[in-house]
Image (tube, rainbow, N blue to C red):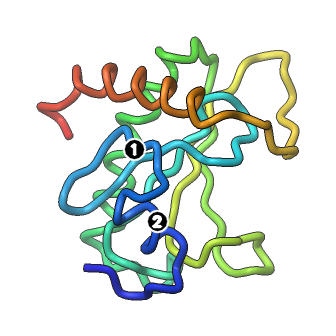
Amino acid sequence: MIDLPECVFCRNIVTGKEAHIFYRDDHVIGFMDKYPVERGHSLIIPVKHFENIFTIDMEYYTRVHHTAKYVSMALMDVFHADGINVGQNNGSCARQIVMHYHLHVIPRHCGKEISWDRLLVTDAELEKEASLIRKKLSTFMDKL
């Protein structure tokens, strides 16, 4: 299933080597962003390698976005968020850093402007957040 060993997501996330995963099925993986801009900043990727929105096939695209709906609901609850940003970049000019299709799902709080500076978080903090999201997502399993 891993297409490009040089892809950091294929090499480290799909294989589970360096990831705080809160959801995984045959099509998608949800995990904590290692360099979050807000607490709870999550990523959702297809298990199969697709570089961007122009190359992802519709089955995987639909599954990623379907999962994002329930991850968003979980993040709203777990992080007591007032809203959610869902973002996706395509190409280096658009600030896509990892060339593997991925969605950013970011909890937001009213009155707090987002800073695109990255937070310093520990692996223990990321794993704790992943555990809370995993627990909340378990209430949606019949829909995922």
Viewer-nearest residue: 124 or 37: 124
The local crowd at label 2, few if under 14, some if 14 to 19, many if 20 or more residues have their Cα within 10 Å, is some
Percent across and percent down for residue 113 are 87, 29
- Amino acid carrying label 2: it is Asn
- Amino acid carrying label 1: it is Ile
Viewer-nearest residue: 15 or 52: 15
Percent across and percent down for residue 14 are 36, 65
Q: Which residue is mark 1?
A: 21
Viewer-nearest residue: 121 or 98: 121
Q: Is residue 122 above or below residue 62?
A: above
Q: Quadrant of residue 45?
A: bottom left
Horizontal side of 72 relative to 143 (left or right) equals: right
Report helix, strand or loop for mark 2.
helix
Horizontal side of 101 relative to 113 (left or right) equals: left
The local crowd at label 1, few if under 14, some if 14 to 19, many if 20 or more residues have their Cα within 10 Å, is many
Report helix, strand or loop for mark 1.
strand
Q: Is residue 97 above or below residue 34?
A: below
Q: Quadrant of the N terminus?
A: bottom left
Viewer-nearest residue: 43 or 114: 43
Q: Which residue is mark 2?
A: 12
Q: Quadrant of residue 114?
A: top right
For discs 2 and 1, the disc positioned in front in the rendered view: 2
Label 1 near label 2: C-beta < 8 Å? no
Percent across and percent down for residue 75 are 49, 26
Percent across and percent down for residue 59 are 24, 70
Residue at the image position 18 percent from the left and 60 percent from the top? 26
Residue at the image position 62 percent from the left and 53 percent from the top? 87
